[in-house]
Structure formats: C-alpha cells, structure tokens
Amino acid sequence: MIIGTTKELKNHEYRVGLTPDNVMAFVARGHKVYVETNAGLGAGFTDEEYIEAGAAILATPKEVFDIADMIVKVKEPEECEYDLLREGQILFTYLHLAPNPTLTDALIKKGVKAVAYETITDNEGNLPCLRPMSQIAGRLSIQEGAKFLEKAYGGRGVLLGGVPGVERGKIVIVGGGIAGTFAAKAAVGIDAQVTLLDINANRLAYLEDIFGASVTTLYSTEANIRKSLKEADLVIGSVLIPGGKTPKLIRKEHLPLMKKGAVIVDIAIDQGGCCETSRVTTHDDPVYIEDGVVHYCVGNMPGAVPRTSTIALSNSTFRYGMLMADNGLEKAVRMDKGLANGVNIYCGKCTNKNVADSLALEYTPLSDVIR
C-alpha cells in the first residue's frame, strides 16, 4: 500500500501522523511512504530522518494526497484539504465528526473510507487510540488551569496547592474517564482539594480505591454539580460519549453560581464540549471570559507538547495502520472488530451510530456495506 502523511494545518498543531520509526516499519513490510516536506519538524523529526527511514519527501500536500492509498494524520482535515481527498482513499486520523457536519458531509460526498482514532475499541471496549491523548490532556488541564487562575489572565489569583496557613484551591472534575483520572492524578500531585463526579458507580468506587482520601468522589447529579461548581476554583470538563456529542452538563445558568475568576477547562471541546458556553479556542488565544468565568477550550491541547504526543499517539495507532496496509481496510475490519468500530464513514455511508444520531444522518451498519 502507498501511505502518506502531511503537515497539520490546525492552529498551533505540531504533531505529525507518522514518526520515522513508523515509516521504517512500513517500508520493511514492502509498503511505500510519502511525507510532505517539514511535516514532522514541529515534533522534532527532520526530512532527513524520514528519508533515512525509507520515505520519499514531496513538496506539497496535494502531491501526497494524490499518490497515497491511505492518509495518516493527527487532526481532522481542514476545509482547504477537502478537495484533496478522493473516492476510496483511506483517511486515518482523529475526526470528531459529531460537532462538525461540514466535514462529515464532505467525507460522505468524497466517498472516502474515514477511520477515526477516537472510536476504535479494544477487546475490553476501551478506546486505545484516544487513551494517550486523553492522558496528556488530563495532565495538561491542571497545568493550564493553574496558569489561567492567575490574576493577570482574569483568574481568581488562587494558588491551587496553597501554602501553610492558606486554604488550598478546589478543583472539580466532571467525568471520571481516562482524561478525568489523569487530571485527578495531576491535581493530587499539586496538593489541591479535588472532587470528581461521574455517573458510573463502579468507576467511582475504582477511583476511590486508587486515590483514597485524596479525592472526594460524588455521583453526578444536578444537585451535586451545582454544589461543586459553587465551591470550585478550577473545573475540568472531561465527559465523553464515543463518537457522539458531549452532553452539556455545565449550563449557562450555572455560571452565576461560580466564583468570579474561576476557570473552566473543557477537555471535551473536540466533541462539542460539556459546558454550554464553551466554544473552540486556539493555543495563541486560549481563553475568554463569560459571566465572570474564564473558559479554556483549546481543541488540540496535546498539540502543545508535540514530541511527547506524537510518539504516544503513534504507539497506539500504528498497529491498526499496519493492519490496514497489509490487508486492505475491508479485510482488516473483519480481522479486528475494534478497528471496525473506528470506521465512521465508508464510501458515502455513515457507519457510526453515535455520529449519525448526533447529526440526524441515516445510519448504515458497516456490515451492510462490507460483506
């Protein structure tokens, strides 16, 4: 198979879809790899490293898209890339289609085979290709939240870890999945007061076993959300419905309950956000203030640490890319049901139910189009 990767175009996105190590492994199995010039530079990988690994360097993204059977990226295509896609081409990347009807429509019309990292599952039903970025985003959420609590950015001027004789800052984490768990780890590490809410009682029990008295766990009800928001200096939104839009658990009516200068970090913004007042921001303009509350809603948080993020991501995605390269998409999804769950769009059909439901599209089971 001919595999290609291009430079990411999203604002301050420095990650890259393939590392030189990935290229070397593909080439060793008889595949050809084409890389857009300087595609990996932001993550610390030079064109020379890709060439040494066996890739060919092309000058423009169009050249890569034109030649490749499978495009491996990090983020969803930007609008200027839609016309580069072609019928039958495999697009392997994060897609987050539920809040993006324009991209979804383009993928359907182009007839591509779009495989989303964020909906691939393993044998236990976990999300292996989302996990590393959730881990990074969870840790970063505390780091960024602490920064924007500083008075110069409109925050309350609270030091989350406190000092002797001064109350420690209060962090509320809504959602106890991977991102929420790693946010809790980082929050406990700086000695903040931490409350974590989730609707899964088993998950709460598990988290209580891990963190003990360092974290207060609460079942996520409207009353508990309101009570927690009133006390919070920093709120982390880390709710996830795989492939679907995130429910708006923090609503506009809640903001007046919060302290002036409190901060919300909405990790879930890629899927629409779990705060009603969230809108996508960028690394060069990451925050805005609404109703006195600082909102941080950067849509590609792990892009801030591209070297770590690229290697962590490729460690998880590579085996699925190789499976498709060796066997073709159709055979690969028969071999791995978890990979089949990653196919969101297939040759003009929406094959992910959560995406279809979120965008009011006709849902077609993948098994109906791949026999």
Image (spheres, rainbow, N blue to C red):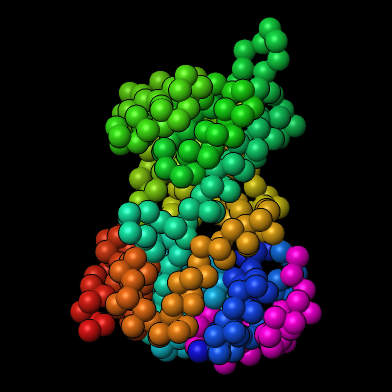
Describe residue 309's horizontal placement relative to residue 130 as left or right: right
Q: 249 or 114, which lies in front?
A: 114
Describe residue 343's horizontal placement relative to residue 46 as left or right: left
The picture places residue 98, in percent across and down from the top left corner, at 38, 61
The picture places residue 227, in percent across and down from the top left corner, at 40, 20
The picture places residue 6, in percent across and down from the top left corner, at 63, 77
Q: Residue extending furthest left?
A: 368
Q: 298 or 332, which lies in front?
A: 332
Q: 209 or 8, which lies in front?
A: 209
Q: Which corner quadrant holds the C terminus?
A: bottom left
Q: Is residue 63 magenta?
A: yes
Residue 42: image quadrant is: bottom right
Q: Residue extending furthest bottom?
A: 67
Q: Residue extending furthest front?
A: 28
Tell me the residue at 40%/85% (across/down). 328
The part of the chain drawn in magenta is: 44-71
Q: Taking 192 as reference, is 284 above or below it?
A: below
Q: Taking 205 as reference, is 114 above or below it?
A: below
Tell me the residue at 68%/63% (across/down). 14
Tell me the residue at 71%/64% (across/down). 43
Residue 117: image quadrant is: bottom left
Determine if residue 344 is in view. no
Determine if residue 129 is in view. yes
Count up the numbered dots: 0
The picture places residue 201, in percent across and down from the top left corner, at 29, 32
Q: Is residue 314 magenta?
A: no
Q: Taking 217 as reference, is 110 above or below it?
A: below
Tell me the residue at 44%/77% (across/down). 323
